[in-house]
């Protein structure tokens, strides 16, 4: 019994020393590994809710777009969390009870936000140029999915006074579903993309109570993410996953519609628009998931008589290289201006 206890104690000591050594190595290596498993940017911050993250308030700095030409553009936000022009007052009190103007709130992702261009070249700002009678609020955030945009509205903007219109344009969840297929979940978005990559290879996140994720395991997961990301392949869809995807879209649209009844505002849904010149860079599954999303947005507008639908996918692609900044979906000033003019016309026809 004594020999067994001594042997067990030695094994336990060796294990403890090994774990401590691995943790020290992991801690040291992480100092040089800047891989982010939760993708946020300088102008956003994490939240502990379904938004995952939101925009920082009173922020102003240049943003470098690493992916498309290394262009720099300014991002400035107000004290209320809207993207604004550098000429605007950060403490503009857009949500103040004293602001009696009718308002239009733009929700969505980087397309509506105006990624890659100055605020003055974005859709909300150009819409304001043609509609001075409105107080225009850019509440979009790059990377946001349909569910995140709605969650932000519910948490941050539900009490906006004199809100007449809510404009929504998103890309996600289409890319996630096109990529993950039967492995797709409703919480998938751009922010947790690394988690999606690791999930497809059954690499879970391990958290130890009162300690958190071990440094050594965190380094291992980051290493595996970099390796698997390069080799990641699409997962096929089936009827069941299609039904799940469509149900997710419909349930979120109904959720937003119910919220608009609270604010007595009109919902305007925009199609997800992608450039024709980059069609070959997107897989069939990716394009199919966009088509399903747009079909459900359009059908929802038919089901709800007080919901409007704006589809400029064809008009933007008459000269797609002029209207889009990149292979993804981001609008140039010309593209955003066309959207602003068509949105203005749509609203004028019903007012």
Image (cartoon, rainbow, N blue to C red):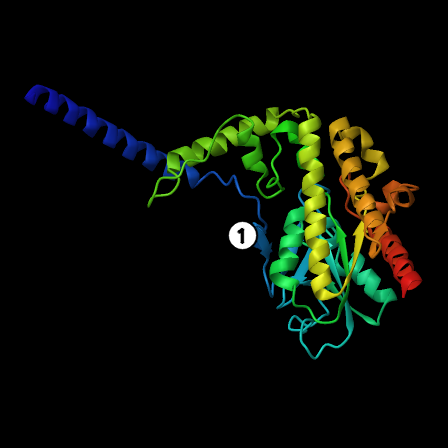
The residue lying at 51 percent from left, 53 percent from top is: 48
Residue located at (68% from left, 48% from top): 252
User: Does 200 sit left or right of 211 as displayed?
Assistant: right
Dot 1 crowding, Cα within 10 Å, few <14, some 14–19, many 20+: few
In the image, 155 versus 250, the foreground residue is 250
Residue 169 screen position, x and y as percent: 76, 50
Image point (69%, 36%), residue name: 245
Q: Residue at x 77, y 31 (%)?
A: 288
When asked about the image quadrant of residue 126, the answer is bottom right
Task: Specify whether 335 is left or right of 40.
Answer: right
Does 71 sit left or right of 323 as displayed?
Answer: left
Farthest-out residue, bottom: 98
Q: Answer whether residue 287 is visible to the viewer in this image.
A: yes
Q: Determine if residue 325 is in view.
A: no
**Relative to 198, does residue 42 appear above or below in the rendering?**
below
Image location of residue 187, percent across then percent down: 59, 41
In the rendering, at what x and y percent does residue 9 appear? 15, 27
The quadrant the N terminus occupies is: top left
Q: Name the residue carrying label 1.
A: 49
- Percent coordinates x, y for residue 3 in the rendering: 8, 19
Depth order, front residue of 214/202? 202
- In the rendered image, the quadrant that contains the C terminus is bottom right
Above/below status of 32 relative to 40: above
């Amino acid at each position: 019994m004594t020999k067994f206890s001594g042997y067990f104690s030695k094994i336990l000591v060796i294990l403890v020393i090994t774990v401590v050594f691995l943790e020290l190595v992991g801690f040291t290596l992480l100092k040089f590994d800047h891989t982010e498993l939760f993708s946020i940017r300088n102008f956003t911050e994490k939240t502990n809710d379904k938004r995952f993250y939101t925009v920082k308030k009173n922020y102003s700095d240049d943003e470098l777009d690493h992916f498309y030409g290394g262009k720099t553009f300014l991002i400035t936000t107000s004290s209320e969390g809207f993207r604004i022009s550098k000429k605007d007052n950060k403490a503009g009190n857009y949500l103040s009870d004293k602001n009696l103007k009718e308002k239009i709130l733009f929700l969505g992702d980087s397309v509506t936000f105006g990624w890659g261009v100055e605020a003055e070249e974005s859709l909300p700002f150009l819409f304001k140029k043609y509609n001075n009678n409105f107080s225009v609020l850019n509440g979009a955030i790059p990377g946001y999915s349909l569910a995140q945009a709605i969650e932000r509205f519910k948490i941050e903007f539900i009490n906006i006074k004199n809100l007449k219109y809510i404009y929504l344009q998103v890309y996600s969840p289409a890319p996630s579903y096109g990529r993950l297929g039967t492995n797709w979940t409703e919480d998938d978005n751009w922010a947790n993309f690394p988690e999606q990559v690791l999930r497809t290879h059954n690499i879970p996140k391990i958290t130890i109570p009162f300690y958190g994720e071990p440094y050594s395991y965190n380094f291992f997961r980051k290493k595996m993410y970099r390796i698997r990301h390069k080799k990641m392949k699409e997962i096929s869809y089936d009827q069941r996953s299609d039904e799940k995807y469509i149900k997710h879209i419909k349930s979120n649209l109904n959720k937003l519609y119910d919220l608009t009844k609270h604010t007595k505002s009109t919902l305007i849904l925009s199609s997800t628009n992608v450039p024709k010149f980059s069609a070959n860079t997107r897989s069939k599954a990716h394009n199919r998931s966009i088509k399903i999303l747009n079909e459900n947005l359009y059908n929802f507008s038919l089901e709800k008589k007080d919901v409007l639908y704006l589809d400029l996918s064809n008009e933007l692609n008459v000269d797609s290289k002029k209207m889009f900044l990149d292979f993804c979906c981001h609008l140039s000033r010309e593209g955003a201006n066309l959207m602003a003019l068509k949105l203005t016309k749509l609203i004028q026809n019903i007012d």
